[in-house]
Amino acid sequence: MFDTSGAKKLVEVRDLTMHFPIRTGLLRRLTGSVKAVDGVSFDIYEGETLGLVGESGCGKSTCGRAILRLYDPTAGSIRLEGEEIAHAPFDKLRRLRPKMQMVFQDPQASLNPRMTVAGIIGEPLMEHTKLNAAKRLERIYELMDAVGLNREFANRYPHEFSGGQRQRIGIARALALNPKFIVCDEPIAALDVSIQAQVVNLLEELQDRLGLTYLFISHDLSMVRHIADRVAVMYLGRVVELAPRDALFADPMHPYTTALLSAVPEPDPASHDDAERIILQGDVPSPANPPKGCNFCTRCPRVMEICRQIDPVIREIAPGRHVACHLYAEDTHKTAAHAAQPTEV
Amino acid sequence: MRDGVTPFVLDVKDLKTVFRTRGGEVHAVNNVSFTLKPGELLGVVGESGSGKSVTMMSLIRLLPMPPAEIRGGSVMFEGQDLARIPEEMMRAIRGARIGMVFQDPMTSLNPVFTVGYQIIEPLRTHMGLSKAQAATRAAELLDLVGIPDARRRLGDYPHQFSGGMRQRVMIAIALACDPKVLIADEPTTALDVTIQAQILELIKELRQKLGMAIVWITHDLGVIAGIADRVMVMYGGQVVEQAPVRELFANPQHPYTRMLLETVPHIRGERAAKLRVIQGQPPILSRAPDSCPFLARCPQAFDRCAHENPARFDVGPAHDAACFWDFKTGAKRDV
Ligand SMILES: Nc1ncnc2c1ncn2[C@@H]1O[C@H](COP(=O)(O)OP(=O)(O)OP(=O)(O)O)[C@@H](O)[C@H]1O
Ligand SMILES: Nc1ncnc2c1ncn2[C@@H]1O[C@H](COP(=O)(O)OP(=O)(O)OP(=O)(O)O)[C@@H](O)[C@H]1O
Ligand code: SF4
Ligand code: SF4
Ligand SMILES: [Mg+2]
Ligand SMILES: [Mg+2]
């Protein structure tokens, strides 16, 4: 498994916050904000895959998009190879753009239906390089080879392909400018089970070959267990646990992670006989109005008095294991006192 | 077995559904046969486009005709052949004697009516209840599916409920008229795992309370492992394997099922270094196949598979598989 000791930090995210304004009424007055991402901090090491999991609406996509600066973050810091980009101006971003790319969930919706495969893959080359037409085509063919698309398909249109093939087109486009870092936002969610394995294997192969670093966003926990080196679990705009993959799946520490993993049905009938499933009651609160104290306190099976008062800070409680929960505070008062300070993750 | 002297609530034989499109015919469902016992939960799995939804839609005749055409087969339910009865009789069965739940509750609930109205309506038309009786029953149903403060929530509109609660409402509507059979098409696919766990728990509880038979379509083998009594695997518009749930997972006998079980990663136990891939594409169903539909992707394929479509062979107790290869003897089947 990936060893972080001595590995270089490619992306460093600190207290990243992304709030969306809520406007209501005829005058579209600002009446509140959706706290989609609410102060998250983590590092992504060069060559690793960091899995980002959590339920619908917890802020995974917003987090990934903010890191790539597809949004202007409300607050916080994002460093790419040491360079601060959270509030970088457009021309600096344009220069950095080739280094970081995104693969989207819905291959159908993310590809322009009126462009050929060659056009789609070649678009970033047109925009960011000075390659002439012949060189460009050569590069397009190279990329098609890399993702396992037959060169003869270069002049076809997206609708002529299957879902898995369309996702390959999206991956080829993301690779066009030799990026270092790719945010994969649910890249397999729209694909059939038998096709998912093809795309995941391709992503793994490309990582080995090209030394890519991935932020792999998914709600499919068993696939994340397969592909990720470390895993961050989000709940309601926060990272509640971050740990090496094997440790997280074998011994989840945050009560939400424990519940989430226990809710995943295993494809093995016998495992259901004695499964002590934790069925969480109720729904996730709205990110426009998160509860006081711990964000998980309204559903947590282990909630304590302090949880409804004080927001737990994420801390490294064992090597590489970061948890935001009062159950792991040696001294809750001390933790509370630290609450105002930024944390090192 | 014409007059209800049958052990089955539903007995589907040789169902054949074809779409007539401008590009030609699509043989979506090809001689599908299956049965359902009272109280049983039949899980249906299979690749996208393998005909799971069209099969179930055909038997309750909920397909647009044209382009769909039911070209053959029988669907015996309570002594009647649903493939042959007139539409107004079908209407009295659909949504009443046979309930339905679909993947996306937002598209199946009408946004302009209150949830209460949408439960009360079928109770009045199908069960002939008075307004007051229906309202009481509607509140009971919402309560049954675990919606707190049920009576008051009857006046709320669908958008005022969360995704998980809307799916509970859909289940309440499907259960309103006390169906004999419930058809659930990917009912938890759009939900989060923790909410899915709530719904699965609810279904287990309701089955015990109400004793209805359920057909549960899903692509999630984990869900199937947890709730099904029996599993039917579909591929290319056909049933390729059918077995009790434990038998199917322990002892799969069709190459597609075997590969499918290996292609999904697990959350516990050993972690595979590389995922198994099923190479190739599903078949184009432009005509009824005269070869095995899995031929192009099958590692086991041999000459016979290319010019004969395998029948469903008995391969164990209550277990059949449509394949010419016999994994138990490790040889070609000699029938
Ligand atoms: N552009 C936007 N304007 C306002 N609110 C937004 C915007 N984008 C996202 N949100 C809200 O922010 C929250 C987080 O959304 P996000 O898409 O990041 O979640 P997610 O974890 O990716 O969920 P999913 O698994 O469903 O993709 C949600 O409540 C969402 O409604
Ligand atoms: N209205 C239609 N016109 C033409 N072909 C159709 C139509 N509806 C479905 N089909 C075809 O029928 C076949 C079976 O589709 P069906 O929806 O039953 O698949 P499924 O097994 O339910 O797949 P999924 O898992 O994606 O829901 C597919 O090949 C599909 O393209
Ligand atoms: S801080 Fe309290 S409510 Fe939050 S996860 Fe820990 S125990 Fe549960
Ligand atoms: S019949 Fe032949 S091609 Fe079809 S699944 Fe069996 S071995 Fe494979
Ligand atoms: Mg998302
Ligand atoms: Mg379907």
Image (cartoon, rainbow, N blue to C red):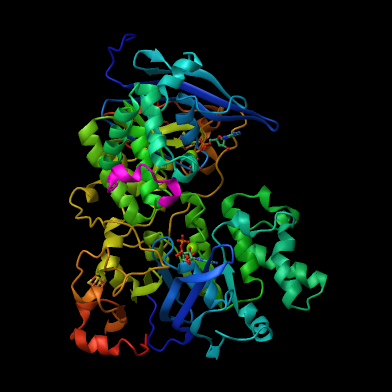
Q: Quadrant of residue B248?
A: top left
Q: Which residue occupies 24% across, 31% down?
A: B210
Left or right of B291? Residue A245 is: left
Membership of A253 in magenta stretch: no
Question: Where's residue B153, x and y in %?
Answer: 34, 45
Q: Is residue A303 visible?
A: yes
Q: Is residue A285 above or below residue B299?
A: below
Q: Quadrant of residue B244?
A: top left
Question: Where's residue A128, x and y in %?
Answer: 72, 77
- Nearer-the-camera pick, A258 or B86: B86
The magenta-colored residue range is B146-160
Membership of B157 in magenta stretch: yes
- Nearer-the-camera pick, A227 or B187: B187
Q: Which residue occupies 54% across, 25% down?
A: B17
Q: Which residue occupies 39% across, 28% down?
A: B122
Quarter of the image for the C terminus of chain A: give it: bottom left
Q: Quadrant of residue A144?
A: bottom right
Left or right of B307? Residue A241 is: left
Question: Where's residue B173, x and y in %?
Answer: 37, 35
Question: Where's residue A87, x and y in %?
Answer: 57, 85
